[in-house]
Image: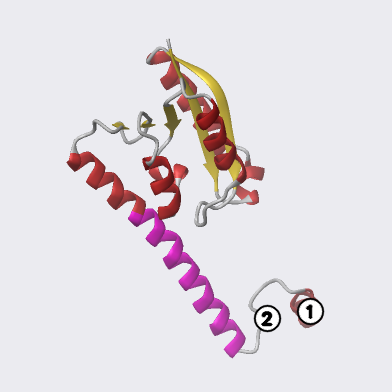
Amino acid sequence: MNQAVVYARVSSREQEREGYSIPAQLKLLNEYATKHDLKIAKEFTDNETAKKEGRTNFTEMIKFLKQNKNINIILVEKTDRLYRNFKDYVLLDEFRDLEIHLVKEGTILSEKSRSHDKFMHGIKVLMAKNYVDNLSEEIRKGFQEKAEQGEYPVNHPMAIKEKAQRE
């Protein structure tokens, strides 16, 4: 029986507190493993943005895979749960025998994958990166507009106090 690691991620503490996304991802990935006769060696979860490299448990997963060369399968829900930055994409691409099972996308990526599948995956990685870049841009734009209107751009204690005094 082939062994795999599972990786699930949410972007923020708020999503983690809602409590549904990580368990739902793990359930999906465990069901997939059972259906495909894969033994799960270890589960890794993060509640951090994938905008930048260096997520805590993603890094631990990389270390684990390097130490356990007989485990060469990652199960993940979809591309943007695994990474939203190009450095992590390149890092995983350097593993020669690695298979990445993108369960919701119905794709298995490996060194033997067709060039078209690799190309489409690369586009999905760039789209995921663009999503976070655009989100940051829109947030900065909103903060700038609030500041120009004389408001605090975030829930600053002074803004909360002023709002309470107005009401």
Mark 1 secondary-structure assignment:
helix
Q: Residue at left 50%, top 56%?
A: 51
Nearer the observer, 141 or 8:
8
Against 133, residue 21 (above or below) is above
Badge 1: few (under 14), some or many (20 or more) residues near its Cα, within 10 Å?
few
Callout 2 amino acid: Tyr
Mark 2 secondary-structure assignment:
loop
Highlighted range, magenta: 126-148
Q: Residue at left 36%, top 28%?
A: 97
Say if the magenta span includes residue 55. no
Q: Residue at left 38%, top 41%?
A: 94
Residue 158: mark in rendering: 1
Coordinates of residue 47 in the picture (x, y in percent)? 61, 45
Q: Is residue 84 visible?
A: no
Against 43, residue 53 (above or below) is below
Callout 1 amino acid: Met
Q: Is residue 140 visible?
A: yes
Coordinates of residue 130 in the picture (x, y in percent)? 38, 61
Nearer the observer, 30 or 165:
30
Q: Quadrant of residue 38?
A: top left
Badge 2: few (under 14), some or many (20 or more) residues near its Cα, within 10 Å?
some
Against 52, residue 135 (above or below) is below
**Tag 2 near tag 1, CB within 8 Å:** yes
Residue 152: mark in rendering: 2
Of the numbered discs 2 and 1, the one sitting upstream in the chain is: 2
Q: How many marks?
A: 2
